Image (cartoon, helix red, strand yellow):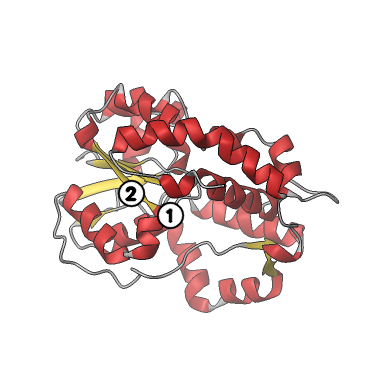
């Protein structure tokens, strides 16, 4: 079986769903039914054969691969990917690390990892060190550059996607050596809007069903639920805006976090050759 030619590595809450959709639509690109295979991070003990089976139903294509945001910040993953796919092209999407941490917090509240009376961002920071760890972009990219040439890593910014999605889409297609004139239908769609669950047990049940459909070959069940309208009904019943339950973060908290990320942002500017001044403003 032909091995993947590209791997999307995250970061988490940085438009990986958008990237997956524009790749899935392109006629010269193949993706597995499951967006986040997580082989090189969470399922490495399953072995290469299991990973390859994830692509068994993919159509023949010029480029084939998967996107798993868990890969970027896991220290062991770059060497694992390089050992199996030494010529792989690496897709990395990033955003303002403070905004990424805020989005991370909303996700943790939605899935119930943080619960109780205090759902503030400050409580989330105290509870989950990965809010900061995943935003250490230069540190993690440096690890990837030990195993892959800089030319084999495309860094796209979520802010650029918002400003000109067609230009970023074409850039991604060119990087994967497929037709960059193709325009996907989901180019300007917004994925994973911010919400929390009205009833946590119902949300947990939905996530369990989604987790089951991530088994290779069962993704059609999740898509069938979408076509039948069940997912829309669920969202109307159980989804409420996150701002209704999560208080605004304190200005001092945001300033401290921006100062914490500043050295990483400045190093990243040098690594990718562009200004990130907007990420440094208080």
Residue 249, horizontal then vertical, whole percent: 71, 51
Question: Horizontally, is 158 left or right of 22 in the view?
Answer: right
Front position in the image: 224 or 106: 106
Q: Is residue 44 above or below residue 124?
A: above
In this picture, residue 190 sits left or right of residue 199: left
Give x and y (percent) for residue 52.
Answer: 31, 39
Q: State the image coordinates of residue 253 (x, y, percent, origin top left).
A: 69, 43
Q: Left or right of 130: which side holds 116?
A: right
x and y percent of residue 255 in the render?
A: 63, 43
Residue nearer the viewer, 135 or 220 = 135
The number of numbered badges drawn on the structure is 2
> Front-most of 100 and 25?
100
For residue 102, side relative to residue 14 (left or right)? right
Residue placed under numbered mark 1 in the picture: 15
| Residue 219 numbered mark, or none | none
- Secondary element under disc 2, as helix, strand or loop, is strand
Asked if marks 2 and 1 touch (Cβ < 8 Å), the reply is: yes
Q: Residue at x 76, y 61 (%)?
A: 245
Which mark sits nearer the N-terminus, 2 or 1?
Answer: 1
Above-or-below relation of 244 to 217 = below
Answer yes or no: is residue 34 visible: no
Residue at the right extreme of this rendering:
117
Say whether residue 108 is visible: yes
**Depth check, front residue: 75 or 55:** 75
Q: Nearer the viewer, mark 2 or mark 1?
A: 2
Seen at 67% across and 36% down, the residue is: 128
Q: Residue at x 82, y 49 (%)?
A: 118
**Which residue carries the number 2 mark?**
156
- Local crowd at mark 1 within 10 Å, few (<14), some, or many (≥20)? many
């Amino acid at each position: 079986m032909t091995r993947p030619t590209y791997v999307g590595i995250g970061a988490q809450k940085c438009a990986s769903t958008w990237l997956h959709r524009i790749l899935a639509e392109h006629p010269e690109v193949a993706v597995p039914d499951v967006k986040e295979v997580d082989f090189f991070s969470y399922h490495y003990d399953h072995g290469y054969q299991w990973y390859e089976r994830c692509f068994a139903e993919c159509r023949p294509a010029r480029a084939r691969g998967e996107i798993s945001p868990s890969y970027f910040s896991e220290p062991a993953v770059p060497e694992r990917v390089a050992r199996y796919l030494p010529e792989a092209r690496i897709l990395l999407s990033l955003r303002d690390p403070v905004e990424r941490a805020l989005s991370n917090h909303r996700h943790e509240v939605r899935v119930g990892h943080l619960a109780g009376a205090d759902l503030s961002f400050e409580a989330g920071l105290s509870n989950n060190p990965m809010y900061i760890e995943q935003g250490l972009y230069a540190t993690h990219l440096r690890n990837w550059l030990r195993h892959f040439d800089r030319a084999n890593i495309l860094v796209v910014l979520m802010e650029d996607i918002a400003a000109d999605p067609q230009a970023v889409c074409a850039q991604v297609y060119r990087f994967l050596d497929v037709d960059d004139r193709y325009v996907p239908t989901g180019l300007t769609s917004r994925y994973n809007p911010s919400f929390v669950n009205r009833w946590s047990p119902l949300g947990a049940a939905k996530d369990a069903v989604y987790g089951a459909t991530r088994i290779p070959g069962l993704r059609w069940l999740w898509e069938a639920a979408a076509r039948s309208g069940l997912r829309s009904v669920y969202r109307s019943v159980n989804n409420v805006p996150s701002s209704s339950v999560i208080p605004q973060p304190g200005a001092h908290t945001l300033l401290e976090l921006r100062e914490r990320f500043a050295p990483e942002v400045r190093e990243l500017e040098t690594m990718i050759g562009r200004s990130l001044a907007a990420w440094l403003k208080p």
